[in-house]
Amino acid sequence: MPVLVAHQLERSLGTGDSRVKALRGVSLSIEPGRTYAIAGHSGSGKSTLLYLLGLLDLPDAGTLSIQGSATHDLDDAARTALRNEHMGFVFQFHFLLKEFTALENVMLPMRKLGRLNVDSMRDKAAGLLAAVGLADKAARLGNQLSGGEQQRVAIARALANDPALILADEPTGNLDQANADRVFSLLQEIAHTRGQALLMVSHNPELAKRCDQVFHMKDGLLLP
């Protein structure tokens, strides 16, 4: 079963005479264990699409289902619950809480979901940090880590609730080439070995080409 199915999504941005159609009927399907990139020039609709798929924004028209559950009739609380349970997010800017340790940052999504006790959350967070090569940095504060290390903590945090889908918006855009390659390779390995889907917006054509499938966008449309 697909992790995500979108059908004819439309979205306009702005108000009045300045209103612009950012998405013009976008349909796609995302399968578990595969990596996908959304590529296109600035303003083509990539990030708008990613935010709709991540339930961070609402479409003007079209339908979206996550893990077989339709989302168009859900209220804000139900959408938030679905997002917390089935999705993990990695952004260009990691948004770590600098006054929290790496371990505490990774625990945050688990606290929101509320299914594990503190000891279980701590053990799981430690295991995730080990998986991204940061077992020895668990007690470091967010602002004591390098840019590449902070982004790897963000990946561990995105995996905290075992999401079916990882959504990444320019996850390597703020990194040098060596760290960009390392972060992407880590995301790719996670998707392929854990059966989690990765959907990534990227301006880096070399990284995009390494994904299993690339969606090319232009003027709010997916190109055939």
Image: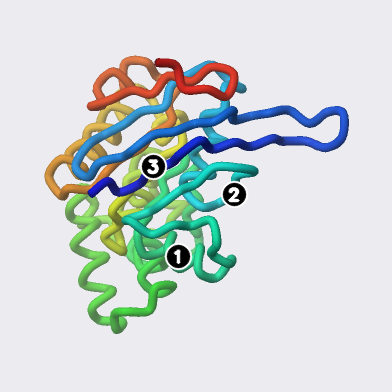
Q: Nearer the viewer, residue 182 or 194?
A: 194
Label 1 Cα neighbours within 10 Å, binned few <14 / some 14-19 / many ≥20: some
Provide residue 13's location: percent of width, then percent of height. Answer: 72, 36
Give the residue displayed 26% in from the left and 65% down from the top: 125
Mark 3: secondary structure: loop
Mark 2: secondary structure: loop
Q: Amino acid at mark 3?
A: Ser
The residue to which callout 1 is attached is 100
Give the residue displayed 29% in from the left and 80% down from the top: 116
The image quarter containing residue 219 is top right
> Do callouts 2 and 3 mark residues in contact (Cβ within 8 Å)?
no
113 sits to left or right of 191: right
Q: Amino acid at mark 1?
A: Phe
Q: Is residue 157 above or below residue 77?
A: above
Q: CA distance from mark 3 to mark 1?
A: 15 Å
Q: CA distance from mark 1 to mark 2?
A: 28 Å
Q: Nearer the viewer, residue 56 or 26?
A: 26
Label 3 Cα neighbours within 10 Å, binned few <14 / some 14-19 / many ≥20: few
The residue to which callout 2 is attached is 57
First in sequence, mark 3 or 1: give its number: 1
The residue to which callout 3 is attached is 146
